Image (tube, helix red, strand yellow):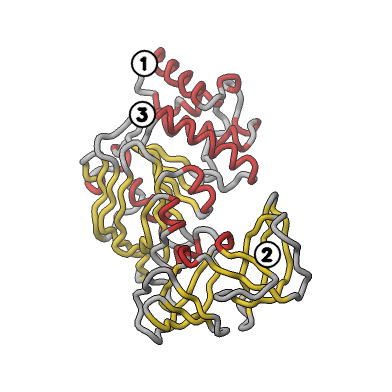
């Protein structure tokens, strides 16, 4: 089931009428790996999936799989498996018949053996003679995956495959998909708007915004080294504080706090910037500290062993901090607190822009 060279998208543009929805989109899906297209609704990720599947023809660019230019191949000959958000199962067919739907060209014994192998893979052998309406949402999703794999595709495309399921079931099936991927090793592209889902399933993320690729990288790379303010805010939570550059490694926030960075920032003195920090990279104190931002304590939410702190800076900017629940006394609502950032984990972007 594995291709030789993976899937490659190069310089793809596409428009619907006068509206351009894809702008010079390029990324790679390594052979046998899972890549998630991640971004807000309307960012173009489903359009790219439709282009790979052959449901639309891009205005420009190439899409190749295992060295073959798919833009020159008819849809039925692309050897792609597809899993839709609504599963698109045939309700009048049994589970086994759904999986066997695309295998009519095979001898009966071979067809039966392949269906049984896939039933075992998705752990649905006891449900072979059941009909989809009698199954749970998670079971239907596994039938859809098995049917997509039945034709031995060169790549698997998944469009919001867990979107219709509740949170607990999504987590269970994400783990199931990872297990199946380890067993099958098929090149997979998954579309999702859920960042946690993307990070749980995919080894590489393609973050999209407004029809463009903002960043490609592993979940760790994108979380720790975001290429733009948009990526920084979309993957995880990021506090955003307005500041001005005072020197090679110096910043002054809107409330006058002086921050000494442990590295140079690539902006000229006087430049307005946006400084971002993750909640877990802020330290909370009820005492003043050099380089700490004064804030008003608003509330604390218990999250297991952690507290998520909501606070407000003097200029009205809302910020979050995450601290250990037993790490010192909890402030009272309205009390003054000081938030000290880990300057090695701060990111600095141009003000009022999504650019890096």
Give the percent coordinates (x, y) of residue 105. 35, 23
Give the percent coordinates (x, y) of residue 75. 31, 42
Q: Residue furthest top?
A: 109
The residue carrying pointer 1 sits among few (fewer than 14), some (14 to 19) or many (20 or more) residues within 10 Å by Cα, namely few
- Looking at the image, tell me whether mark 3 or mark 2 is earlier in sequence order: 3
Residue under pointer 2: 309
- Looking at the image, tell me whether mark 1 or mark 3 is earlier in sequence order: 1
Give the percent coordinates (x, y) of residue 49. 39, 50
Dot 2 lies on which element? Answer: strand
**138 versus 268 height, above or below:** above
Q: Residue furthest right?
A: 332
Q: CA distance from mark 3 to mark 2?
A: 50 Å
Q: Residue at x 28, y 40 (%)?
A: 6
- Looking at the image, tell me whether mark 2 or mark 1 is earlier in sequence order: 1
**176 versus 287 height, above or below:** above
Relative to residue 184, is residue 292 drawn left or right? right
- Where residue 93 sits, quadrant-wise, is top right
Q: CA distance from mark 1 to mark 3?
A: 15 Å
- Where residue 14 sits, quadrant-wise, is bottom left
Residue under pointer 1: 107
Residue under pointer 3: 152
Give the percent coordinates (x, y) of residue 118. 47, 24
């Amino acid at each position: 089931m594995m291709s030789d060279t993976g899937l490659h998208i190069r310089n793809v543009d596409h428009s619907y009428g006068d509206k351009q929805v894809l702008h010079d989109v390029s990324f790679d899906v390594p052979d046998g790996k899972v890549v998630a297209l991640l971004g807000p609704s309307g960012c173009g990720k489903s359009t790219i999936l439709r282009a790979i599947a052959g449901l639309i023809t891009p205005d420009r660019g190439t899409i190749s799989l295992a060295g073959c230019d798919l833009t020159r191949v008819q849809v039925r000959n692309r050897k792609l498996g597809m899993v839709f958000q609504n599963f698109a199962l045939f309700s009048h067919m049994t589970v086994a018949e759904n999986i066997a739907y695309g295998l009519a060209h095979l001898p009966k014994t071979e067809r039966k053996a392949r269906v049984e192998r896939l039933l075992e893979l998705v752990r649905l052998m006891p449900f072979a003679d059941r009909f989809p309406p009698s199954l749970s949402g998670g079971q239907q999703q596994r039938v859809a995956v098995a049917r997509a794999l039945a034709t031995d595709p060169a790549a698997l495309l998944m469009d919001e495959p867990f979107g219709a399921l509740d949170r607990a079931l999504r987590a269970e099936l994400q783990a199931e998909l990872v297990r199946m991927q380890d067993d099958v090793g098929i090149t997979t592209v998954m579309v999702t708007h859920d960042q946690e889902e993307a990070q749980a399933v995919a080894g590489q993320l393609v973050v999209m915004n407004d029809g463009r690729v903002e960043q490609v990288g592993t979940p760790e790379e994108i979380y720790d080294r975001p290429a733009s303010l948009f990526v920084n805010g979309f993957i995880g939570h990021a506090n955003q504080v307005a500041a001005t550059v005072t020197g090679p490694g110096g910043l002054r926030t809107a409330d006058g706090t002086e921050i000494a960075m442990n590295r140079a920032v690539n902006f000229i003195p006087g430049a307005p910037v946006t400084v971002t920090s993750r909640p877990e990279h802020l330290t909370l104190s009820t005492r003043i500290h050099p380089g700490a931002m004064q804030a008003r304590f608003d509330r604390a939410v218990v999250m297991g062993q952690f507290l998520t702190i909501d606070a407000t800076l003097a200029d009205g900017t809302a910020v979050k901090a995450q601290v250990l629940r037993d790490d010192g006394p909890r402030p009272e609502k309205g009390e003054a607190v000081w938030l000290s950032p880990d300057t090695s984990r701060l990111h600095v972007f141009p003000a009022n822009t999504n650019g890096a």
